[in-house]
Image (cartoon, rainbow, N blue to C red):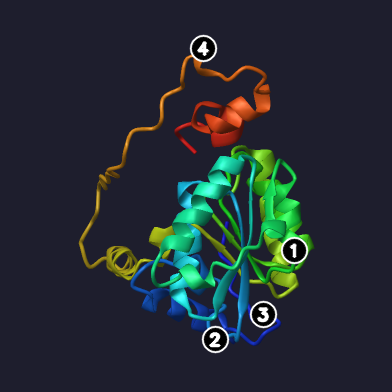
Amino acid sequence: MSNIFNPSRRDFIKSSAGAAATVAASSVFSPYAAAGVIGADKIRVGIVGCGGRGSGAAAQALHADSGAILVAMGDTQKSNLDRSYSALKAETVIGERVQVTPDKMFVGLDAYLKVINSGVDLVLLTTPPGFRPQHIKAAVDAGKHIFAEKPMATDAVGLRIAEAAAKKGKEKGLAFVSGFCWRYDPARREFYKRLLNGELGDVRHIHATYLTTPVKPMPPASARPAGMSDTEWQIRNWYNFTWLSGDGLV
């Protein structure tokens, strides 16, 4: 899926080239900067999915520009939301711009709709990717600028839904940026530019590695709290369920 950089209704970034330059100039990848919303007086940011990635995306959004304020948060688990809010609020540089009031803290499977419809300008979509197509479509329909963490979907059907929504967002003049962060990295862009221009000769093989922490293992059934629904149990352990994670290949 291509990334879409377009002018917003607040006169953010005037062209695709300008938005790309904004991203390339950023020393730390930021969904806020990448979405082309630098320079507005106040940009109201909402986050859907308050786990580790979501909290990181929210922090990056606020660090990217002093005009960004976090005003809405949503998650299926209240514990995630509370932990994320406390961590963000405690950060020295950005804490005062975490301005989420209790009535803008949403919990449940419909929290994404409540965040999207809470008056935000930009929404960060960082839940498990099984929900991504549905969330992207809802955000585009509501006319919101979007940062969507990778991947865009966990199957071909979902991908087509996300792709159609992204095209609609382009027609509406919305900024849409994916979390494929290495596509924005200046060093990697320059490397592949030189590679494709033939400066490295006849390349026969590329080997790449990615070092990360292990995926959280599936806990035993005995660890499941009494009364917890199948859906909640799977969301809490989403890496281990294909419909939510897309499995290792995705």
* Disc 4 + disc 3, Cβ < 8 Å: no
Which badge, 4 or 3, comes first in the chain's sequence? Answer: 3
Q: Residue at x 72, y 60 (%)?
A: 116
Compute the Cα span from label 4 to label 3: 50 Å
Which badge, 1 or 3, comes first in the chain's sequence? Answer: 3
The image shows residue 218 at horizontal and vertical percentages of: 46, 22
Determine which residue is flagged by label 1. 118
Q: Of circles 4 and 3, which is in front?
A: 4
Determine which residue is flagged by label 2. 39
Label 1 element class: loop
Q: Residues within 10 Å of mark 4 (few under 14, many from 20)?
A: few
**Which mark, residue 8?**
3
Which badge, 4 or 1, comes first in the chain's sequence? Answer: 1
Residue 127 seen in the figure: yes
Label 2 element class: loop
What amino acid is found at the position of numbered circle 3 in the picture?
A: Ser
Report the side of 68 relative to 110 (left or right).
left
**Which mark, residue 222?**
4
Compute the Cα span from label 3 to label 2: 12 Å
Label 3 element class: loop
Q: Residue at x 43, y 61 (%)?
A: 90
Compute the Cα span from label 1 to label 3: 19 Å
Snapshot quadrant of residue 142: bottom right
239 lies above or below 204: above
Which badge, 4 or 2, comes first in the chain's sequence? Answer: 2
Which badge, 3 or 2, comes first in the chain's sequence? Answer: 3
